[in-house]
Amino acid sequence: MSIYYLLLTLAIGVLFIGVMLTMIRFLIGPTLPDRIISLDLLSSMLIGILALYSIVSGVDSTLEVALVLSLITFLGTMVFANYLIEKMKK
């Protein structure tokens, strides 16, 4: 095992720790915008984990999953932002 794969595996571990901390913020978050931002950050970290896993394992299909997840996350964030704007107008 080369140092390249060791560093990639370490990066996956660090991102996983970040996912756990973001999940805590998502569950404890005092306001709805905090939870929306933590959900967006959570999906970004999961996309990073999928990309790194694709490099380590050599399976290219996980990059397609990451691409679809990023599109869905972007649309979801825009919907939540629109909801918050409408809620603030009232």
Image (spheres, grey):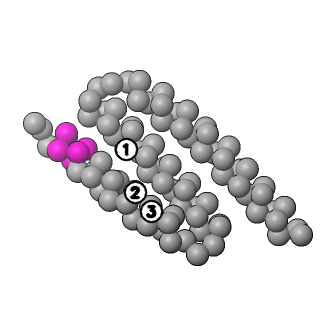
Identity of the amino acid at label 3?
Answer: Thr
- Would you say the residues marked 3 and 2 are in contact, meaning their CB atoms lie under 8 Å apart? yes
- Would you say the residues marked 2 and 1 are in contact, meaning their CB atoms lie under 8 Å apart? yes
How far apart marks 2 and 1 lie (CA) works out to 10 Å
Residue 58 among those drawn in magenta? no
Residue indicated by mark 3: 22
Quarter assignment of residue 33: bottom right
Magenta range is: 5-9
Identity of the amino acid at label 1?
Answer: Ile
Identify the residue at image location x=76%, y=63%: 84
In this figure, what is the number of numbered marks? Answer: 3
Image position, residue 58 (x, y; %): 29, 26
Vertical placement of 8 versus 37: above or below?
A: above
Residue 19 is labelled as 2
Question: 10 Å neighbourhood of mark 1: few (<14), some, or many (≥20)?
Answer: many
Residue 49 is labelled as 1
Magenta region, main secondary structure? helix
Quarter assignment of residue 4: top left
